[in-house]
Image (tube, helix red, strand yellow):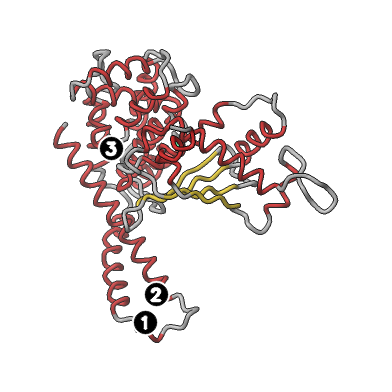
Amino acid sequence: MTENTLIAEKKTRMIPISIYFTDEDNYDDFIPDFPGVYENEDQEGPIFEDVIHEVTMQYLHKAFDRLEYLFESDPIHNISIGIDLMGLAGIEAIQTGGLNKDGKNNIMIGLMPNMIRAFLNKYWYQNSFLDPFYELNFDHELVHGLDTIILPLNPSFVNQKLPKEYFIKYLMKYRLEGLACLVTFLRGIQGEKSIVKSKEIFQSKIEKLLHCGMENKDDCEKFNEKVEDERNDPYEIGPMMMLHVIGVKAIRENDDTLLDLVKKGMRIEYVTDLEINRIIAAGLKIDLCEYISSLCEISWDERPFIEREKMKQMCQTVYYWELAPKDVNLSISASSKELEDLEHKLAGLNRSALSEDDYTLFEIEFNIDQLKKHINYHAECEDLYLKYLKIN
Ligand SMILES: [Zn+2]
């Protein structure tokens, strides 16, 4: 078999990929801020867009090669990559997407300036050091794209309102980032390496949240803010939490091979690319309810990640918190009424009378979609608490 046929057989090579600039009209103003000399009115050189295309595909394919095992079942159907030369402070890359109505998983990965700069630096200056963190950012975002089991509890463009929704978002962040960060953590980059310290940090976070006063409406807002403030530690202790949960799964399913891999990961021993993929593949099957329950179960080190009683107390407290602002509770029941009205309006709309630049239909359909997402999210949260509280 030639190398070309081997490549052609790789599932990742079948995925359509498009690359575009997020700021289509003004991106060329920013080109001088990046390494290299490119063609312009008084300068010869390669065309900036061509170089960006080349380096992006080069590092994306490297990520594909590392992750190939996870793509065997065609889990991603389309990838668009947005090149953002202006970027957001403190963010290297982002991923958005989710299952379309037709069941297709089309994802978008946004590359930010630091990552682009690192790739271009290596392109122009061969002996420069390329921090593996930047290359592995592609793997990280692709793992997010593969992580579809959590989508019902992590819908895009839905804002949390109640403390119980904020708390779910908080735990979700550990589950999501903990899994995606395994691509770096298991290669020795990023994350708290001590099991004991990771547990202590998480337990003290929960303890702090438990001691937020939960008396009145202001406390409710304070709680939500506090939960939002803790946004960065999922990258620190998330990977170890995820390994704990995958270990619990391996024990439950008598999967000794997986358990051995998890132990190696938690003991910060060397693991191969394939072993990393096997661990991630197991993590991709864990939904949020299993995740929260498994944190309280004993793993191979004979300890839970957090005491069952503490987590239960936390979940009960936010779930039964009656003092959420009245307008928030009202807005949820109002959503159903609003949806009903909009659906009525849509049914009565005379489509043939609409001119081409009339966006009424588009607007109604968009608003219906958003309302459905919010109502559905609220119902998914309710289900999660009821299911969790029933089994714990
Ligand atoms: Zn991430």
Q: Residues within 10 Å of mark 1 (few under 14, many from 20)?
A: few
Looking at the image, is 160 positioned above or below residue 179? Answer: below
Looking at the image, is 28 positioned above or below residue 68? Answer: below
Q: List the residue tagged with mark 1.
A: 351
Residue at the left extreme, as displayed:
390
- Where is residue 150 shown, x and y percent of the image? 31, 42
The image quadrant of residue 223 is top left
- Where is residue 18 shown, x and y percent of the image? 52, 51
Secondary structure of residue under mark 2: helix
Q: Residues within 10 Å of mark 2 (few under 14, many from 20)?
A: some
Secondary structure of residue under mark 1: helix
Amino acid at pointer 1: Arg
Q: CB under 8 Å between callouts 2 and 1? A: yes
Determine if residue 181 is in view: yes
* Label of residue 361 in the image: 2
Give the total of numbered labels.
3
Q: CB under 8 Å between callouts 3 and 1? A: no
Q: Earlier in the sequence, mark 3 or mark 1?
A: 3
Residue at the front extreme, as displayed:
1
Quadrant of the image for the N terminus? top left
Amino acid at pointer 3: Leu
Amino acid at pointer 2: Leu
- Where is residue 225 shown, x and y percent of the image? 43, 41
Q: Earlier in the sequence, mark 2 or mark 1?
A: 1
13 and 330: which is toward the camera = 13
Distance Cα–Cα, label 3 vs label 1: 42 Å
Viewed as shown, does residue 224 lie left or right of 86? left
Q: Residues within 10 Å of mark 3 (few under 14, many from 20)?
A: many
Looking at the image, is 44 positioned above or below residue 205? Answer: below
Q: List the residue tagged with mark 3.
A: 288
